[in-house]
Image (tube, rainbow, N blue to C red):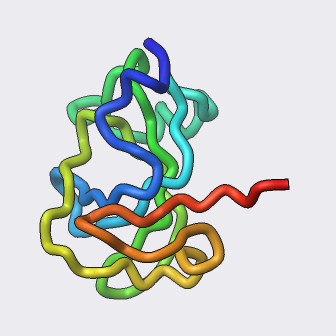
Amino acid sequence: MRASQAKFMLGQVVRHRVYPFRGVVFDIDPVFDNTEEWYQAIPEEIRPRKDQPYYHLLAENEDSYYVAYVSEQNLLPDLSGDPVDHPDVQEMFGELEDGQYRFDVPLN
């Protein structure tokens, strides 16, 4: 599977299907690309498949900001229209428009 087949796009605001956090997609792996130790730490009954896109998120919950690595099957679009307050969002993206941050690539 190629990243172009990913369900979510760079700059899109998403939320986790189960856990109470949301974030902005800033990178996409076409398939699982983390350590086996990280993967095995996920309880087997909820462990996602490796053969799907995985998303790097600038994530937030009620208590903190962090970077999350989440499988496509565990994400949903965030339709709230609310901005993500993670401090790195402003460094990586432009304005929020219709649930997606502009991903401005500087021209050289």
Q: Residue furthest right?
A: 108
Q: Position of residue 70 (x, y in %)?
A: 40, 45
Height in image: 81 above or below 30?
below
Classify residue 26 as left or right of residue 70: right
Q: Residue at 63% x, 33% y: name it.
A: 35
Classify residue 72 as left or right of residue 17: right
Q: Residue furthest front?
A: 107
Q: Residue at 21% x, 31% y: name it.
A: 45
On the image, which quarter does residue 82 sit in? bottom left
Please name whichever residue, 56 or 34, is drawn nearer the observer in this view of the structure. 56
Q: Quadrant of the C terminus?
A: bottom right
Q: Position of residue 78 (x, y in %)?
A: 19, 62
Classify residue 25 as left or right of residue 76: right
On the image, which quarter does residue 44 sit in? top left
Q: Position of residue 101 (x, y in %)?
A: 42, 66
Q: Residue at 46% x, 63% y: name it.
A: 102
Q: Residue at 36% x, 37% y: name it.
A: 71
Please name whichever residue, 97 or 80, is drawn nearer the observer in this view of the structure. 97
How many numbered discs?
0
Height in image: 1 above or below 88?
above
Q: Position of residue 38 (x, y in %)?
A: 55, 39
Height in image: 12 above or below 42?
below
Q: Quadrant of the N terminus?
A: top left
